[in-house]
Amino acid sequence: MCSRDEVLLMGNNLVSFEGAISHSLRDDILDCLLYAEQSADKKYDRSTHWKLWIEKFQRVLYKNGGRLIGAIDADQLVIQHVRELRYVPYMIAGSATSRELQAVLERSISTLLNSSHAQTFFKSWFSSGCSESLQVIPCQANERGGVNILVCGLQMITRTLKPGHFFWEAVDGDLTIRSNGGSFLLTEESYRPHRETIIAHLNRRAREAIFEL
């Protein structure tokens, strides 16, 4: 993993920042992504309506300052081992990724699979019919200012007859991966009109969560 990248696991979002991105813009992106996730969760159950959920997630980014600059061709991949997730960047086609952004995506997935988070995240997945999803979101500084954000949404459905000895192994089973997403350009100027509204929403949700404890 290149040391210039900062990788954060935020809920079901694996977010990577290339080092050239300012801290203030990183904070704005994290807030916008969290707001998009909460908005999509309010509208759809991602376990049963994942396509509608990931499309809603992207619409929220678009409506809050993210200019759509490319799209991922929806695709499907069947693998037998979680470690084969390393091949995911090569199934992402369409106009969503530049060579540089794909490189950040590759490093993000490699970091996930080599981290302790992977075992926690995947250890219970190899049960027949289990469906989970996550978003791998690499962010790269744009040469004209702002940040290119790739939303790589992945839905994973397992069909396992017998678990392997280790969490990443399966015997007589497979993992179907569906992809959906796009790339967006977010700048300080495009996000500024939405910043206060999103911060107020997130603060309100945080207070509600505390009261529910």
Image (spheres, helix red, strand yellow):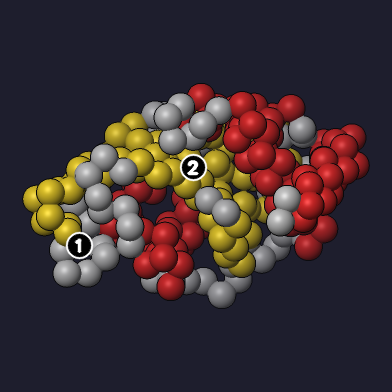
For the image, the number of numbered tags is: 2
When the figure is inspected, residue 4 is found, relative to residue 206, above or below; the finding is below
* Badge 2 density bin: few <14, some 14–19, many ≥20, Cα 10 Å: many
Q: Describe the element under mark 2 as helix, strand or loop.
A: strand
Residue at the spot 48% in from the left edge and 53% down from the top edge: 105
Whether residue 102 is visible here, answered yes or no, is yes
**Residue 65 versus residue 8 in the image, above or below:** above
Earlier sequence position, callout 2 versus callout 1: 2
Residue 152 — which label? 2
Disc 2 residue type (three-letter): Cys
Identity, as a three-letter code, of the amino acid under mark 1: Glu
Q: Which numbered marker is on residue 148?
A: none
Q: In what quadrant of the picture does the C terminus appear?
A: bottom right
Q: Position of residue 164 (x, y in %)?
A: 16, 63
Asked if 10 appears above or below 189 in the picture, the reply is: below
Indicate which disc residue 169 carries: 1
Dividing the picture into quadrants, the one containing residue 84 is: bottom left
Q: Name the side, left or right, on which 26 lies relative to 150.
A: right
Q: Residue at x 78, y 62 (%)?
A: 23
Residue 16 visible to an observer of this rendering: no
Q: Nearer the viewer, mark 2 or mark 1?
A: 1
Q: Is residue 211 above or below residue 91?
A: below
Residue 13 left/right relative to 74: right
Spot occupied by residue 128 in the image (x, y as percentages of width and height): 22, 44
Q: Residue at x 9, y 50 (%)?
A: 172
Q: Position of residue 81 (x, y in %)?
A: 22, 56
- At 12% across and 55% down in the image, what residue appears? 162
- 125 left or right of 207? left
How packed mark 1 is, by other alpha carbons closer than 10 Å (few <14, some 14-19, many 20 or more), is: some
